[in-house]
Image (cartoon, rainbow, N blue to C red):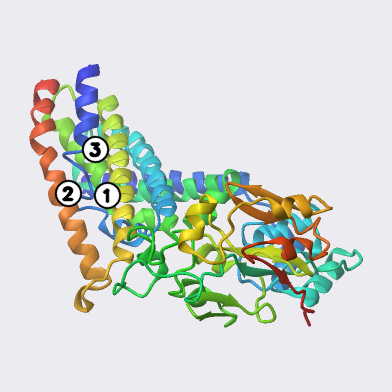
Amino acid sequence: MIKSLVAVFLAAILTENYVLSKFLGICPFLGVSKKLNTAFGMSTAVTLVMVLATAVTWPIYTYILVPNRMEYLETIVFILIIAALVQLVEFILHRYVPALYHALGIYLPLITTNCAVLGVTMLVIQKGEMYASFGYVHALVNALGSGIGYMLAMVLFAGVRGRLETCDIPKSLRGLPITLIAASLLAVSFFGFAGVVDGLLPGALF
Amino acid sequence: MNGIVLAVLIVGGIGLIAGIGLAVAAIVMAVPRDEKADAIEEVLPGANCGACGFSGCSGYASALSKGNAKPGLCSPGGKEVADKVSALLGVAGGDVEYKVALVHCMGSYDNTADKMIYKGQNSCAAAAQLFGGIGSCSYGCMGLGDCAAACEYDAITVCNGVACIDPVKCRGCSKCVAACPKHLISLVPLKSQAVVRCSNCDKGGETRKVCKVGCIGCMRCVKVCEFGAVTVNHFLASVDPVKCTDCGKCREVCPQGCITLFAGVKKQ
């Protein structure tokens, strides 16, 4: 159990990194990664929403949608739940952590439309159907790992962009083009993890 | 038919539950608005510069309304804003403590040399990443003008390789303090006082090799000061503006001439 949880966690961070391997959530990845502290705050909020959303959507899928054979409602129901959760997180932050609320600003409500969150909730259900031993706890750990992986990508990229800003870049590549090139190089480097953790995952789950 | 009804019921039901939950949460976790703080924030300049020591204008406004701060801290706003804020709070208008930015370096082309021919991007932040900067003094001003670019009041010019701040135009917003990669700029109170115009923390011999007017940490200013205003840390003197009476003795004994008079200028 523990071994499989660790494997799921590591795989979610490194091989299945939502930004760098699955290319989900690219908009905030490019939008908020200019400064280290906003990148960190944003990815903390995303991680929180990912775990909360999975904690709610998994039971709803398993105990409401599947018995009624309404699996095709997955996407719309999940979007509904994520939107409500993000709003709730916003209320909570505004009331109890106003500093973080103001630091995140517009990006907090934008998590609603962050496809990485929807991706996590839907892909863990896919995994649950693929592997028999992949249960609720695995799903939560997977969501947490995905959030941490998102944070890792954001923080790494914030460092890269800090360096980029002080480089003498050819005029035609300045701004978004060089940022996308840097992002693709970072993504390529993450493919190096593929062999490392991939071997762990199926063995641990069966 | 049944399938459609069930689907509508499921989605509608989940939506209804989420909606009711959010409505309850909005009431339970409503953030009480501070009307006084809102009124004060209207009066403040809105530059969010942080010169008052709080996190932006709204932070200062809420501290003021709770009585945790004095009205005169807004340096960019000056006396006018301080008076308005005092009127809103119903207290007597206090004096404004004006602060202006000062470059703690005199490493102009006459006093120090460059150690490289820099042809990179015209920015101090970029140059600072290259072997500690252009100048032979790794602590000194590189004169590429990141501070001048950050200044919204045109108070900073780069003259002869070192940044100069016009104390009359400067409004103490501290944007340049944040922009300088060498941390050479600090805010000093606007009064007549002695200031150390050097930031070199190397030993005297090392400093002497790279700059004609660098502080060598000889301690003469410390010994001569009757008010205990001068201290030397890491071979670099600094003057406490509160204790300094501008008697001028430290300026006279300084062998390097890096302690200078900072004349207080009246703000309108």
Q: The residue marked by circle 1 belongs to what chain?
A: A
Query: Of callouts 1 and 3, which one flags the residue occurring earlier in the amino acid sequence?
Result: 3
Residue type, mark 3 in image: Ile
Q: Residues within 10 Å of mark 1 (few under 14, many from 20)?
A: many
Percent x, y of residue A192 = 11, 41
Question: What residue is disc 3 on?
Answer: A13
User: Callout 1: helix, strand or loop?
Assistant: helix
Residue type, mark 1 in image: Ala
Question: What residue is disc 2 on?
Answer: A22
Most foreground residue, B107 or B120: B107
For the residues bearing labels 2 and 1, Cβ distance under 8 angstroms: yes
Asked if one can make out residue B5 in the rendered structure from this viewpoint, the answer is no
For the residues bearing labels 1 and 3, Cβ distance under 8 angstroms: no
Question: What residue is disc 1 on?
Answer: A116
For the residues marked 3 and 2, what is the alpha-carbon distance in whole angstroms?
12 Å
Q: The residue marked by circle 3 belongs to what chain?
A: A
Residue A155 in the figure: left or right of residue B258: left
Rendered residue at 21%/29% (across/down): A8
User: Callout 3: helix, strand or loop?
Assistant: helix
Percent x, y of residue B244 = 80, 59
Q: Are both tags, 1 and 3, on one chain?
A: yes
